[in-house]
Amino acid sequence: MNDEVPKKNGAANGKEGNVVVIGKEWPPCPSCATPCKPKDMRCLSCGHDLTPGGAGAASCFSEQELAERLRSLSLRKKLMTLFFVICLAVAAVAVISLFKWLLVVLIIAAIAAVVFWILSWSAGAQIVHMLKVNIVRTALSGVFAECEYAPTGHVAGSDIRAAGLIDGWDVSSGNDHVRGKYKGHSIEFSDVHLEKESTYTDNDGNEHSKYKTIFKGQWMTCKLNRTLDSMVRVREKAGLWGFAKNKLGVRAKGSIETENDAFNHQFEILSSDPHTAFYVLTPHFMEYITAADRQANGRTFLCFSGDTVHIAVHNGRDSFEVRGRGSEIKNLPALRQRMQREIKYITSILYELLQNDRLFAQAAKCADVRMNF
């Protein structure tokens, strides 16, 4: 197996450490973990004051500063793209020309085109990163206490595998990694992409790897401050790729059925202790899961294990997607509102889940009583 887990570096993951950038070690910004040159007075991505005795974590770009920096980067990206196109045009003319001396022009134009393309791509990447650390991170920090946000991190593959919800994958990746607290409960969240690796041999006898998507969507964990002795898994029966490939209406071995026929038809419940499953899956919560699954337009999976619940939603989408387009830069308030709507979807699941907090306590208590007997 080749699990890919996020590399933890900088303040975004709660650890100190330098970041290697093109062979150099640059210290990460204490606020957003972006690599900063030692001579920088402020972080160029989030505006954090880097001077000794400065404003500290409270410092950030003002709305006007952020807008101006984004417009400057956008203009740079457009100019580099224009120069790239011009260089390609010059190279094309040199190719179709019969004059040998234009070979030099072709080489120079081709090199210049590559340089301008890299500069254009770099400016675009900077725009996306700035939007992430200033818009997305700020929106998340307004909802989750002690929020840590890493745009390129994701939930560890080992944690995903331990939940036992998705089978048949080899490689994990993802982005938009969030850690924090919601109503006093520790949460972790990210987009996750799980793939199955296979090999094939071409006509020349060379082996190549190819990857098939098994899961793409959101993965969230929440600490409940309660402990269940038995694990409870809820998996949708409609098989997609590597999911449980049970036909609708067919009961899997060991599956538990409830009094909710619609829920039984759509989901399978796996647990060694039916009593724990019934305490966790109250009638109201089952109705909510069914409704939320329809709204998500995907497949929903849950795992209750110990003091942690895993919630996975396969919908083929990335959350907090930012493309750095001109429309986003020109209308930052609209972008903020979109991020807030996506956060609201996450918190609605958490809020509904935490309504069952007393039930987890009852389930644990009942398990203790049975053990005493």
Image: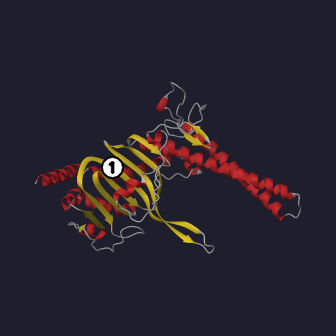
Q: Is residue 358 visible?
A: yes
Q: Position of residue 262 (x, y in %)?
A: 27, 69
Q: Position of residue 26 (x, y in %)?
A: 57, 37
Secondary element under disc 1, as helix, strand or loop, is strand
- Taking depth in this image into account, of 345 and 373 the one nearest to the observer is 373
Q: Is residue 356 visible?
A: no
Considering only vertical position in the picture, is 248 above or below 307?
below
- Residue that extends furthest to the top in the rendered view of this protein: 53
Q: Quadrant of the N terminus?
A: bottom left
- Taking depth in this image into account, of 333 and 177 the one nearest to the observer is 177
Q: Position of residue 49 (x, y in %)?
A: 53, 31
> Residue beneath label 1, please?
222
Does residue 19 appear to the left or right of 270 in the view shown?
A: right
Q: Position of residue 92 (x, y in %)?
A: 79, 61
- Residue that extends furthest to the front in the rendered view of this protein: 205
Name the residue type under label 1. Cys
- Taking depth in this image into account, of 250 and 162 the one nearest to the observer is 162
Q: Measuring 60% from the left and 35% from the top, which residue is drawn there?
A: 37
- Residue that extends furthest to the left in the rendered view of this protein: 373
Q: Quadrant of the C terminus?
A: bottom left
